Image (cartoon, helix red, strand yellow):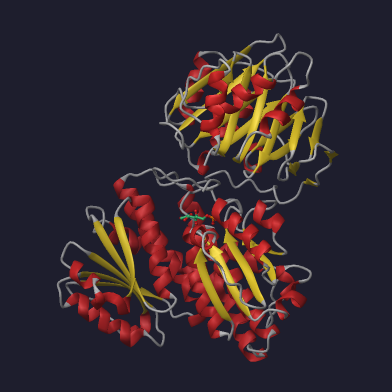
Amino acid sequence: MCGIVAAVAQRNVVPILLEGLKRLEYRGYDSAGLAVSTDDKEIKSVRKAGKVNHLTEQVKEDNLIGTTGIAHTRWATHGQPTAENAHPHCSGGTIMVVHNGIIENHEVLRQKLINAGYTFSSQTDTEVIAHLIAYYQKENHPLSEVVKQAVTCLEGAYSIAVMDRLSPGKIIAARSGSPLVLGVGIEEYFIASDPLALLPVTHQFQFLEEGDLVEITTSQATIYDQQGKQVQRPVATDHFEFDSAEKGNFKHYMLKEIHEQPEAINNTLEGRITENRILPQSFGCDAEKLLKEIDTVQIVACGTSYHSAMIARYWFETFGIACQVEIASEFRYRNIVVPKRCLFVTLSQSGETADTLSALRLAKKLGYASTLTICNVHGSSLVRESAMVCMTRAGAEIGVASTKAFTTQLTALLMLATVTGRLNGTVDAKQESTIAQALHKLPGLVKSALTLKNSIQHLAADFSHKQHALFLGRGTMYPLALEGALKLKEISYIHAEAYAAGELKHGPLALIDVDMPVIVIAPKNALLEKLKSNIEEVSARGGQLYVFADRSANLTETNCMKVIHMDTVPDIITPMICSVPLQLLAYEVAVIKGTDIDQPRNLAKSVTVE
Ligand code: F6R
């Protein structure tokens, strides 16, 4: 999704803006632009379709320099990803605006502004904001008041940064529904969609809240809340020491993040489990009391996070707690009947996914017993708006395809299911101890699963010319199959489907032929024998099988079946371990196909619009 960077300083801010945009590339975008001004009331802008590198070349060519500037990566929603539609958008050669989100009433506003004599040069909803600000501008009126007046006309979700040629050295930013953070420097201030964009210039951040508007100059930052009252927002300094925006020796962020999983899971567990127990406080100070008061759980999430939710349902039910899971975009538009004593749980890497956030806000109105989020981004909207929080502590995930956020979410969910069961008397001390011990082993077992990389590399060549692939699993391996298929399709662009293996003969078996590779995840568990029958069904029809199997599963290679042997691990943690080969398979196939692995086409990291 779009990214904003803005800066006011006494030095040239162009390199800061460009570096910030590079660091926001992971969010997904298709064009970029920036505008800068100097004290002599000159304003210059550059906009380019395509990557930030193109913008950087043009900026160099035009020799752009300025002490105040706004910059943007755009993910097209209204109008093609062209230079004309890229931000900043301008009104009258003075007002410049960058914007994230969607203005839902832009057509009405556009007509009103056309009637008032304004001319539009783009198809975007954002240009409406620039003209609206110009429309309300009167002589000697402070820019902050004009912007405030303009944003009250906007319906939808937005975060914006605005500069005015006639108010040099000043930027106004505002948020409603899209994230924005203020970076505090020494006699310089910054604005960005994500702290990551600003790590080279500051480690001090103030997260803006819904409806906030901020004015920054080199001497101060002044924040106003929705009611226009001047307010302070807490300064966060920790959690940003580690700059994971660097790829290090890895070719792609995705590969780096796959390899970071043992450490990331370790961080998720740290201080939260003893040898035999999982601490309820891992989910917040009041968690022990709140979790005792619930009988059922409703989990809501999107994409990969939704797959974690599906896996967690098996765990909750194993521990005697009823659990429903739903995709956020469906949940928010259904007529919900709220069960009594039901905990509402959201899962999200970014904490800003628009549908998940709206589902949480709806749940709070509907009267769920309490809310809890499992999230990877400090200060994000889901974290701020949930009663209980468990940070996954995976570190910044830059690759668009989620990997370490997924396995750390699963780790936190297994802890949550166990604790909830214990507090409600359905999990006993022995069971909890077994799970705690499995969790202690988890980082090491994930590490040894990473050694499968070489054998998977060999396998990947078989997939690179295929058009389709089918993933099969049973029990928790069914949602994991869905996740494996999602990973393959998003980064290699191969059409991949996943089925619960028991569903094969109810339709998908018709697809099986030599051109349809079938990936099966076969840990040693109570469903293994049934899964073997499904494997037979595929091989009897000439399908080419790739089976990730437990060493002791007694599956041997044949002409039509390759077997990748995996270590025997405690059953309860197989979803985390088996994720690793599926991530590596998708990665290696994408490497052969030469796709843009960290920023696959049409996808965004943080989906802040519906
Ligand atoms: C896939 C992927 C997406 C996200 C989804 C939700 O690899 O990353 O499917 O899982 O967009 O995002 P979060 O978890 O940030 O709410």
In front here: 240 or 320? Answer: 320
In front here: 571 or 354? Answer: 354
Residue 421 appears anywhere in the view: yes
Query: Hey, which quadrant is residue 463 in on the image?
Result: bottom left
- Percent from the top left, x then y, of residue 230? 84, 37
- Percent from the top left, x then y, of residue 23? 56, 38
- Percent from the top left, x then y, of residue 430? 64, 91
In front here: 583 or 91? Answer: 91
- Does residue 184 lie above or below 415 as drawn? above
Residue 447 appears anywhere in the view: no
- Does residue 336 lie above or below 258 as drawn? below
- Does residue 610 lie above or below 561 as drawn? above
- Does residue 246 lie above or below 515 as drawn? above
Residue at 22%, 53% in the rendered image = 465
Residue at 72%, 79% in the rendered image = 293
Q: Is residue 607 left or right of residue 392?
A: left
Q: Total label count?
A: 0
Q: Residue furthest top?
A: 40
Query: Hey, which quadrant is residue 510 in on the image?
Result: bottom left
Residue at 50%, 52% in the rendered image = 256
Q: Is residue 131 left or right of residue 526?
A: right
In front here: 335 or 92? Answer: 335
- Percent from the top left, x then y, of residue 240? 69, 47
Query: Hey, which quadrant is residue 460 in on the image?
Result: bottom left
